[in-house]
Image: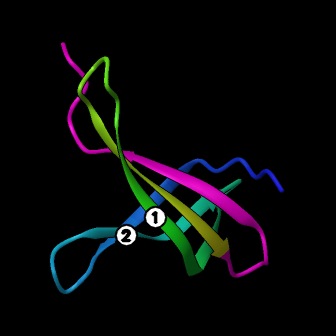
């Protein structure tokens, strides 16, 4: 199921790794209930790394959340 969201709230775990805690969609805050899986992916061409999370939200939706670990080049 696809869901568009405006922004993601990130929370640091006990090891300092950020994980998604909630998403905002249409002015509503929806809590992340479960992280089903997460992967760290490195793009061979650009060398950039991103983390990808598959999450179940409190309403039952399953969404994919991506976070770039390096800033975009200027």
Tell me the number on the disc at residue 59. Answer: none
Horizontal relation, residue 12 to residue 33: left or right: left
- The local secondary structure at tag 1 comes to strand
In the rendered image, the quadrant that contains the N terminus is: bottom right
Q: Is residue 52 left or right of residue 62?
A: left
The residue that disc 2 covers is: 19
Residues in magenta, as a range: 57-74
Q: Quadrant of the C terminus?
A: top left
Mark 1 vs 2: CB contact within 8 A:
yes
Q: Which is nearer the eye, 31 or 55?
A: 55
Few, some or many residues within 10 Å of mark 2 (<14, 14–19, 20+): some
Vertical order, 20 against 14 (above or below): above
Mark 1 or 2: in front is 1
Position of residue 55 measured from the top left corner of the image (x, y, whole percent):
60, 69
Give the image location of residue 61, x and y in percent.
77, 68
Residue drawn at x 66%, y 74% as measured from the top left:
56
Question: For the point 70% across and 82% down, which residue is it?
Answer: 58
Q: Residue at x 58, y 47 (%)?
A: 6
Question: Which element carries disc 2, helix, strand or loop?
Answer: strand
Q: Which residue was labeled with disc 1?
A: 38
């Amino acid at each position: 199921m696809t869901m568009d969201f405006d922004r993601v709230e990130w929370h640091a775990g006990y090891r300092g790794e950020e994980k998604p805690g909630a998403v905002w969609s249409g002015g509503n805050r929806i809590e992340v209930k479960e992280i089903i899986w997460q992967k760290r992916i490195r793009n061979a061409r650009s060398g950039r790394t991103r983390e990808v999370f598959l999450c179940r939200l409190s309403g039952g939706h399953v969404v994919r959340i991506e976070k770039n670990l390096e800033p975009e080049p200027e």
